[in-house]
Amino acid sequence: RERLNRGDSLLTKDLTELLPGSGPPDEDTLEELETRLLMADVGVSATQQIMDGLRERLNRKALANRDQLLQGLRQEVHAILDPVESALEPRQPGDGPFVILVVGVNGSGKTTTIGKLARRFRDQGKSVMLAAGDTFRAAAVEQLQVWGERNDVPVIAHATGADSAAVAHDAVQSALSRDIDVLLIDTAGRLHTQAGLMDELKKVRRVIQRVMPSAPHETLLVLDGSTGQNAIAQAREFHSAVELSGLAVTKLDGSAKGGVLLAVARELKIPVRFIGIGEAAEDLDVFRAEDFTRALLE
Ligand code: GDP
């Protein structure tokens, strides 16, 4: 968790020096804080909510000193993050695998996150299978296969250029017959056009449902947290195409951009399942509002 803000937290860097030790914050201090929130990618509406909350406290004289301001800030940030804390429990009531359809643009960290998740579920004693559904990109199939071999996890793959819905179809069938606990299905992150990509994802989803009507049990979007407000626009587009049930926000290590999680929480209201905090297999944490608030503000 210390790795979350290996850089300085933009929110609180020198904040304690900025704030008056005693007495309520003046207008300049509040404006400086607001600017910092916006610079840290917190986004307009989350920033507004935080500042409104602080001003309301100021009005009722509950912001009498630096400690109370920091405390107020902490509570406002937590109030935004708490509603999207909802851990993913890969268990489904009937027989058959818990199917996770993983979507996201190229470079977001999709393949890495699938590898990390496979490792996590396997370490929990579950049997895991991967489906190399990004048939558009040869390297994506190879990357997943290498990962599978190294970790002894079966990978369903067709040749590059094959129909990605067919890969998903075979994978669900195979997972059903092999009594697999968790099936992670990779998908393309780029096609000739964005509309083409969304259509393909919808088709993959339909085909999965045909083989197993209750699936996918989770449609997880992998978002690059270092892309700031761009991530929000991307998430909206995926959400309208395939109805997301969870997010994994990556690359929250080493940058001061953790504030993007506040924008994500406030504007998307989709459960944040995991956060990526590095490139290694273990660098994936379950998202916890309280831990994240602390990491952002300390
Ligand atoms: P894909 O194209 O979406 O499948 O993306 P990849 O999984 O290939 O990841 C793209 C790059 O981002 C790779 O260099 C990964 O090592 C890196 N990456 C993925 N997740 C994280 C993360 O949480 N933190 C950092 N620092 N790098 C990450």
Image (tube, helix red, strand yellow):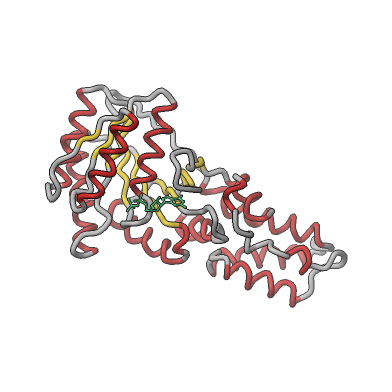
Name the residue rendered at 44%, 39% in the picture: 281
Left or right, 155 with reference to 10: left
Which residue is most to the right?
22
Name the residue rendered at 16%, 45% in the picture: 165
Residue 29 figure quarter: bottom right
Left or right, 34 with reference to 244: right
Name the residue rendered at 75%, 76% in the picture: 27
**Residue 155 spot, x, y in % from top left:** 24, 34
Q: Is residue 59 visible?
A: no
Left or right, 131 with reference to 151: left
Q: Is residue 44 above or below residue 117?
A: below
Residue 54 figure quarter: bottom right
Q: The N terminus appears in which quarter of the rendering?
A: top right
Which residue is most to the bottom?
28
Q: Is residue 110 visible?
A: yes
Name the residue rendered at 60%, 58% in the picture: 7
